[in-house]
Amino acid sequence: MILEIPLEIMKIKDPDGQSRFKAIVSFGDAIAHSEQSQKLIQIQNQYAELVNRWQRIFTELRNSRKLMSDSHVQWKLADEIYSFDKRIEKDGYVFANASEALSRDLEVSKSRLNYLMKFRKHYPSIELVSPKINYSKYQEILDIRKPEIRELCEKMILSGELKKDSEIRAFKRKYRKKKTS
């Protein structure tokens, strides 16, 4: 049986004023699983390395409209974040404060992170992501709850029937009204 120990990543300041990350678990879990301290150190070190990498990627995205709209670039970033989360789970932990920690450390909104994670979960393989559909359109598609309606919307975007985000929003409203009628 794999344990699911809640883990949080905190940003702390050393006495010398240097900020660093610390992977922490509850006192009870620390006592019950004292052999895990090495694993926690590995996780916090890996997190620090990845945060540096992801900060650079987010900076590049902010500075390039082309990259920001590239659904494959966004999927690859989402996959890296998702994969880190899954590695933690494989080690028996649950990244309990993922949204808060990543938002704080990457200086992006929780909403932005949640869309990235939703994107990766709905499209588990990059082959399922069309480079012909920009990321903002995928964000609109992700708001559609029913998979069959999401697929229809995606097909209509690819066929050129829906070209603008506003047209996709109108499509979503139309299907929401049908559901409530």
Image (spheres, rainbow, N blue to C red):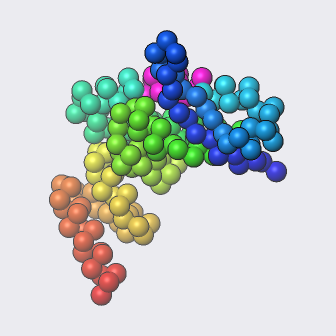
Q: Position of residue 26 (x, y in %)?
A: 67, 42
Give the residues in magenta. 45-54
Can residue 125 be seen by looking at this rendering? no
Q: What secondary structure predominates along the stretch shown in magenta?
A: helix
Q: Please give the name of the residue rendered at 29% of the width and 45% of the height, measured from the top-left corner.
A: 134
95 to the left or right of 74: right
Above or below — where is 122 with respect to 96? below
Between residues 137 and 41, which one lies in front from this camera angle? 41
Q: Position of residue 25 (x, y in %)?
A: 66, 39
- Whether the magenta-drawn stretch holds residue 68 is answered as no
Q: Please give the name of the residue rendered at 46% of the width and 15% of the height, measured from the top-left corner.
A: 17
Q: Position of residue 170 (x, y in %)?
A: 20, 67
Q: Please give the name of the residue rendered at 38% of the width and 23% of the height, measured from the top-left corner.
A: 56
Q: Which quadrant of the structure image shows residue 161?
A: bottom left
Q: How many marks?
A: 0
Q: Position of residue 127 (x, y in %)?
A: 47, 44
Between residues 99 and 125, which one lies in front from this camera angle? 99
Q: Please give the name of the residue rendered at 71% of the width and 48% of the height, measured from the top-left corner.
A: 4
Q: Which quadrant of the structure image shows residue 92?
A: top right
Can residue 1 be seen by looking at this rendering? yes
Of the 4 image quadrants, the one containing the C terminus is bottom left
88 to the left or right of 114: right
- Whether the magenta-drawn stretch holds residue 49 is answered as yes
